[in-house]
Image (tube, grey):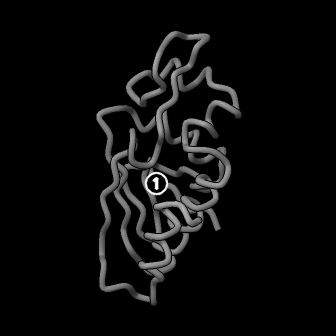
Amino acid sequence: KPSSIQRRANKLRMTRPSPIRALFLDFDSTISTPIFVDRAGKWAVADDVALFRSMTLAERIANLGGSKRVEALRRLLQELVAAEVTLHIISIGYGCAFGPHLQELGIIAKTVGGTAAAASAAESVGPRVAA
């Protein structure tokens, strides 16, 4: 059965350019699915930079909902960028906490001057994403 992200991606199969010009997504509990990190005794949310920096690869994948969900996010964000949709990832947390997680998992490719190209999004993606 397709995940909710896969169902949304199927509905949004974009044509270039999309009539949708911008999309705003929250990081914590929208892009991420926060996990409780037992060793730290805390929930993994983006306002805890030290915890995010200490997370293992397995914890990072789990915090984004698992491998299948990470791949679905990657595909969805790539399609948005290809359709010239500007993606704004907003958070009460810190881009310096979640940006590296998205980059490491191939959801964003690189950060240059606060802007990241989607892997082929973290405060702004158009054909670019800001982390």
Rendered location of residue 21, percent (x, y): 30, 76
Which quarter of the picture shows residue 66? top right
Q: Secondary structure at mark 1?
A: strand
Q: Give the residue at x 37% y 51%.
A: 89
The residue labelled by disc 1 is 115
In depth, the one of 39 and 4 nearer the eye is: 4
In depth, the one of 122 and 76 nearer the eye is: 76
Rendered location of residue 52, percent (x, y): 54, 26
Position of the N terminus by quadrant: bottom right
Would you place residue 115 above or below residue 63 in this image?
below
Badge 1 crowding class, 10 Å Cα cut-off, few under 14, some 14 to 19, many 20 or more, is some
In depth, the one of 46 and 94 nearer the eye is: 46
Is residue 52 toward the left or the right of residue 55 in the image?
Answer: left
Q: Give the residue at x 65% y 68%.
A: 120
In depth, the one of 77 and 42 nearer the eye is: 42
Would you place residue 80 above or below residue 29 in this image?
below
Which quarter of the picture shows residue 119? bottom right
Rendered location of residue 19, percent (x, y): 30, 85
Hey, what amino acid is under mark 1? Thr
Would you place residue 46 above or below residue 18 in this image?
above
